Image (spheres, rainbow, N blue to C red):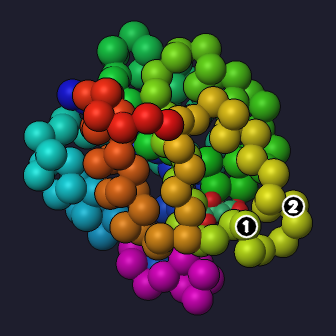
Amino acid sequence: MKFLVMNGPNINLLGIREPELYGKETYQALLDRVRAACGAEGIEVEFFQSNHEGALVDRIQEAYFEKVDGIVINPAAYTHTSVALLDAVKAVKIPAVEVHISQVSEREEFRQISYIRAACVKTIAGQGVEGYCQAVRFLKQFLLQKVKP
Ligand code: DQA
């Protein structure tokens, strides 16, 4: 099983950026943590982070041709604005889990809208960086048809 773990704008600044919201763990520490979780599940993983919407769309399209089995995606601010990312995930038909480090449902009103949610089998929010590991484990079970969306 091969997964792609994607992050949108400013996630590369984890540890520096608003630690009271996003924690003290760096982006590199996040990668190490998720790589370990994937290793424990026997999942091959690739990571991608970009501050550019089009680059994220391109990476989702590439995942189709690479036969990626599942996508874990935190589109960050593009969650609340991007129809292009929604369309990309729908287009490739790769099961995807939406992750947010913070509890978006308890934040500003503009963060209540998620365009990508409509294309995802599950949303995990407010679990900190551990949410990515939960997403990986869920996606594996989902692909093995052991859990439903
Ligand atoms: C975020 C929540 C978004 O509203 C915000 O723009 C981010 C990070 C999160 O992980 O909690 O950049 O996706």
Is residue 102 rendered to the left or right of residue 15? right
Looking at the picture, does residue 60 appear above or below residue 131? above
Residue drawn at point x = 42 percent, y = 62 percent = 131
Q: Quadrant of ligand 1?
A: bottom right
Which segment did they paint magenta? 17-27
Q: Residue at x 39, y 74 (%)?
A: 26
Image coordinates of residue 149 in percent, x first then y, are: 50, 37
Residue 94 in view of the camera: yes
Residue 93 spot, x, y in % from top left: 52, 17
According to the picture, the residue beneath numbered tag 1 turns out to be: 105
Residue under the image location 34 percent in, 22 percent down: 68
Q: Is residue 44 above or below residue 128?
A: above
Instruction: Tell me the element at label 1.
Output: helix
Q: Residue furthest right?
A: 109
Residue flagged by tag 1: what amino acid is it? Ser
3D distance between C-alphas at marks 2 and 1 = 10 Å
